[in-house]
Image (cartoon, rainbow, N blue to C red):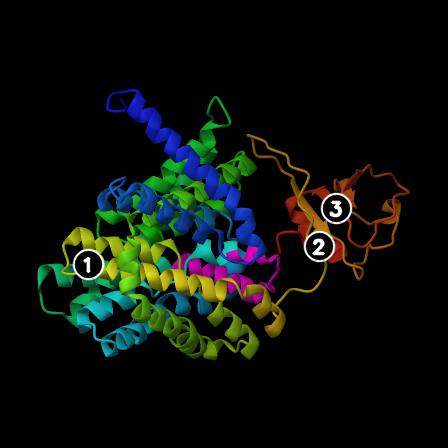
Amino acid sequence: MFATEPASTALTLTAAGILLLLSVLFSRASERIGIPVVLVFLLIGLLVGVQFGHDLIDFDLAFRIGTMGLALILFDGGLNTPFRQVRAQLGPASVLATLAVVGTALLVALAGWLLGLDWMVALLLGAIVSSTDAAAVFSSLRGSGVQLNRRVGATLELESGLNDPMAVILTLTLTAQLAGGEPFSLPGFLGTIAVQLAVGAAAGALIGWLGWLLLGSIRVPAAGLYPALTLAIALLAFGLPTLFMGSGFLAVYIAALMLGNRRLPYRSGILRVHDALAWLAQISMFLVLGLLAVPQALMSFGWRGLVLALFLALAARPIMVALCLLPFRYEARETAFIAWVGLRGAVPILLATYPVLAGVEDAMGLFHLVFFVVVVNALIPGATVRWAVSLLGVERGGMERPAPVLEINAIDSLPIKIISFNLHPAALVTGQPARVLPLPAGADILLIVRDRQALPVTPDTILQAGDHVHIMLRPEDTRAVELMFGLREDD
């Protein structure tokens, strides 16, 4: 009955719609207990695979979906990362994204070898689980309702965006060694890493700069076409460097950084579309990867996977984070929190599909071992984020941010900007009427949100602590206004 079109396509789309609907509905419950919402997507995929069999998708298609999804997630992360944050924390985040990844891989490999794995297979396992997952880290933080201090939050965000390329390079290189049966060569291994990082960084910067020039020089007939252009830039930023021995994952992140920190037409619309694409990519990646796992195979690695997951969370990552952050003089509590919130997600499971595709011996066993390690590693730190924030005192002081209520979209670039402030009791303007504020020429308060109510601004309006204030001003006056109003919403 369902063997002919369009019935079979309709059945596929119906199943996909049900899976997406269930994933979104269950995400709210996961936030309440602090478990990364993306883990819910993974478990739903696992349950569906158990119920309907594992022929719904194969490893080739899963790898393609996962690769595109990861590229879109990294592009969205780059678009939303300000340069001031990159400049401040680039040093420690880069060390965590490279040396800590390599060190974690070696420590996990040692543990795997002691548990009976072949040394090269243990190295491959360590490489696969060595990087943190941006989607898992920040869905867990959002679900916990906490605001980390800027140093800790920026380091975690930048590290999780930068460390995927290193894990990908390590995994692909070691897989090629195992699949080809060639002896391991340290100089060749290091040379491959250096070439991929250099080509990826250069290509990402060039494509990001050219993309910005393109967006600023052309006019399209509809505002909705601008996100289509940035999507094309994201795909090119991943694809082209990969074809020329570069890291496409590093390139797509750097290209997004270049775009996100420059003036873009219809900026808010572009960011909103890519945020939606990133969430869709996360859901799709975890659902698809969950469909590949077989529960019986997972259980066969139960004790070994549990030991490795605990070793990763309690020893390997904390040791490497402490060593790598030592020169940067982080406080002990900050280092401890960064070490603890190193959640794993879809990226290791995606990387574990590559040995299967390459025909590595016992790759299916390695895939299920990685799956088990990721689930346990995400659950243990993920459900304790709020507790860890309270225990280690890394939450930013002040009031919780209200959701923004004012948005202006414009296709053409204007010589003005709109910024938002959440008034602190100690701000210079708190308690003052609007008429006495020494705002720069051309600057004006557009709107005040107080107790979830939008208030019109008159000369007699008194600014109060907790007000959500939207101000229009010229870009060159930003610093002067910040001195009066305090921290901006995006700081």
Cα gap from disc 3 to disc 1, whole angstroms: 56 Å
Q: How crowded is mark 3: few (under 14 residues within 10 Å), some or many (20 or more)?
A: many
Q: What residue type is labelled 2?
A: Glu
The magenta segment: 140-162
Q: In the picture, residue 181 is in which quadrant?
A: bottom left
Q: Is residue 163 left or right of residue 226?
A: left
Magenta stretch encompasses residue 205: no
Which numbered marker is on residue 62?
A: none
Where disc 3 sits, the SS reads strand
For marks 3 and 2, the one nearer the N-term is: 3
Cα gap from disc 3 to disc 2, whole angstroms: 12 Å
Where disc 2 sits, the SS reads helix
Where disc 1 sits, the SS reads helix
The reply to whether residue 262 is in sight is: no
Q: Write the residue at 49% across / 23% down.
A: 222
315 in relation to 76, above or below: below
Q: Position of residue 28 (x, y in %)?
A: 56, 47
Q: What residue type is labelled 3?
A: Val
Q: In this view, does 149 lie to the left or right of 354?
A: right
Q: How crowded is mark 1: few (under 14 residues within 10 Å), some or many (20 or more)?
A: some
Q: Position of residue 340 (x, y in %)?
A: 48, 70
Q: Mark 1 points at which residue?
A: 363
Q: Name the residue under label 2.
A: 482
The reply to whether residue 440 is in sight is: yes
Q: Which of 345 and 290 is in front in this view?
A: 290
Q: Write the residue at 42% across / 39% down.
A: 19
Q: Which amino acid does label 1 sit on?
A: Ala
